[in-house]
Amino acid sequence: MIRKGDVQWWVLEARKNPAAAPTLIEELAERLVELDAANERLREEVIQLQRRAPVTVAPSQDDAEVRALRRKIATLQSLVDGQTSTEPALVLLTDQLQALRLPPPLARQMAREGRLVLGRQSHARFQSLLLARPHEELVLLTSQRRGVKVLTSSIPLMVDSGAPELGEGPALKQNERLTAAVAVQKPPRFWTLVTRRGYAQQFIHVGLERELAHGRPFFDSPFERDTPAALIDGDRGDLLAVTRWGKAVRFAQRIILGSGSTAIDLENDDQVVGALPLAANAEIVIVTGSGYGMRRDTAQLDAQSKPGGGGKALMQAYDVLGAFPYDPEGQVLFLTYSGKLSLIEMQDVPLHNRASKGTQIRDFDRDPAVAAIALPGSV
């Protein structure tokens, strides 16, 4: 007899170890065959009993188990199918964790054709845009300072430019919404969390996993109504945090206090919009919602000896969307207010040596961008 707990364990193992899913499916299939055979024997016995004396026979418990196993096998098969392609896809998330995957080639086609990627209602609740591979997990951080995990392959994949269908994610609590998301392939030993109000705190991976599993708030902030803005690899290198007003701060992640540190002092209307781990000096691309951008060399931004302070102005703007590592073969993909996609080549973004409003790299007219993401040249 197969217990419900056994089936749940198989599904959990398949999610943790996708490569083992085919073996698990074979085991489940064998058990299903055994149960089918047992069901046939039971049916024959019931028929013989009915011929002798008509009785009311309740549905067999084995029948229910067979149906449950068939559903589980279908679930596991979908997990296996999700591993047939290792190509990354764009993941669009609403504030209530509805999600859609979009292959980069299709995204580029829709950008060229000016097609809408999200309907009006879905776009009104849009929150996050990231790049993830099918086998990666998404860590989704919420306004209630907790997190949930979702397997990327469980999100519906859009295969043509027809009407998009968003998949439903885990249910959130009342008044809870998504504020940040990160795709995880191989988790680091340490994570660094940066909040909207510029607070930074580090977590051991196993400790963060435990808090996420319990579904409880996992960090404190001295700022009222503060929410997560970014979760980055905290193992080594510097933290570079960039704000909506074009300011930035850089310091070694190892000097963040155990209880957390104020990374940057912000004006009331400013907030952190992105963070990067810097292992060495490199060029970054900064873009705004109004279509301006610039490249900056991080060698011009010295690492501070301690967190805090007002940071340094990298760009004169009030609508910075984010900062990304520069890839000469890469692109920046924008999502506009109306739900359209727009692409620019990173190599077309000029290098600037001082703070300015940047160079206009895309004319959005009256349809400003609300999100941006870097597409590596390899995808």
Image (tube, grey):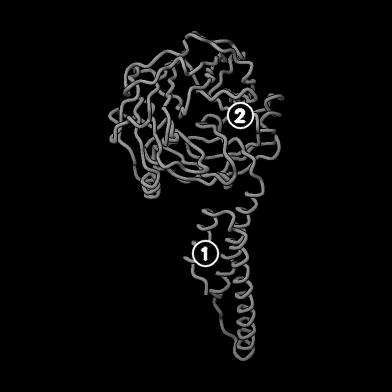
Q: Which mark is residue 128?
A: none
Q: In this view, does 320 lie to the left or right of 375?
A: left
| Relative to 23, residue 105 above or below | above
| Relative to 241, residue 24 above or below | below
Kind of residue at badge 1? Val
Q: Which of the two discs, 1 and 2, sits closer to the camera?
A: 2
Q: Is mark 1 on a helix, strand or loop?
A: helix
Q: Which residue lies furthest to the bottom in this view?
A: 52
Residue at image position (39%, 47%) is 206
Rendering coords of residue 272 (x, y %): 41, 24
Tell me, yes or no, whether the two marked residues, 1 and 2, touch with CB atoms within 8 Å: no
Q: What element carries label 2?
A: strand
Q: Which mark is residue 375?
A: 2
User: Can you identify the residue that label 1 sits on?
Assistant: 7
Q: Which residue lies furthest to the front in this view?
A: 280
93 and 181: which is toward the camera:
181
**Badge 1 or badge 2: first in the primary sequence:** 1
Q: Quadrant of residue 160?
A: top right
Q: In which quarter of the image is residue 189?
A: top left
Residue at image position (62%, 71%) is 30
Calculate the distance from the C-alpha at mark 1 to the C-alpha at mark 2.
39 Å
Residue 354 visible in rendering = yes
Kind of residue at badge 2? Leu
